[in-house]
Amino acid sequence: MIPIKNPWKTKSVEKVYENPWIEVSEHQVKNPSGGDGIYGVVHFKNYAIGILPVDSEKNIWLIGQYRYPLKTYTWEIPEGGGPLHIDPLESAKRELLEEAGLIAAKWKLIQTMQVSNSCTDEFAYIYLCEELTSATPNPDEDEVLEIRKLPFDEAYAMLEAGEILDSLTVVALLKAKILFE
């Protein structure tokens, strides 16, 4: 790839909010056409981690939970955050055990992605894992989770019907559909 020169000029950056997971800053900029503008940026302090567990009969696990920002209940693959200084695979193993109560012997990174690059720097890793062993789930104290094991084709039909909207889950199911064919 040919490197592309950044057409934006940053005049100043002000942190407007921070918590343990994110930092929000306002950037005073000169935009590519030379005009003054502002840009709000959300910096994530963790990677987004998604895991698609698949057993020998091509069943997968989805996690149901209420998502506060959207005020809705969603079905998702096991997912969570992984600290930037820790190998994303280690975070994936932890999340799989915490949320689905599963341990996997075989792991494959199937996708990396920028989750919403118009206003955040969040980066995601999505894994497919196999050779599963059951264990005891241990969700975070702020999680009330429902675990659902179902055939991959049924989960894919949920995606096609618009019942699955979570970005990591959508990408994982679409990628798996390609890999399974």
Image (spheres, rainbow, N blue to C red):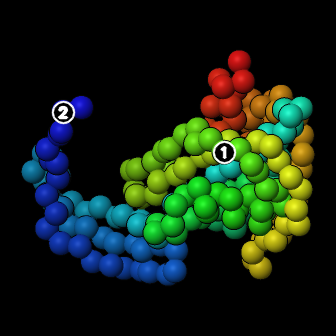
Q: Nearer the viewer, residue 129 or 5?
A: 129
Q: Of the numbered discs in the image, which one, if any, rests on residue 107? A: 1
Residue 106: name its quadrant.
top right
Q: Are marks 1 and 2 in contact (CB under 8 Å)?
A: no
Classify residue 174 by image quadrant.
top right
Instruction: Please name whichever residue, 72 or 127, is drawn nearer the observer in this view of the structure.
Output: 127
Examine the rendering and report whether any part of residue 52 can be seen.
Answer: no
Q: Is residue 86 visible to the viewer in this orientation of the structure?
A: yes
Three-letter code for the amino acid on which mark 2 is drawn: Ile
SS at mark 1? Answer: strand
Residue sitting nearer the eye, 98 or 30: 98
* Helix, strand or loop at mark 2: loop
Rendered-image quadrant of the N terminus: top left
Q: Is residue 109 above or below residue 49?
A: above
Residue under the image location 17 percent in, 53 percent down: 8
Name the one closer to the observer, 142 or 38: 142
Residue 90 position within the rendered picture, expressed as x and y whole percent measured from the top left = 61, 61
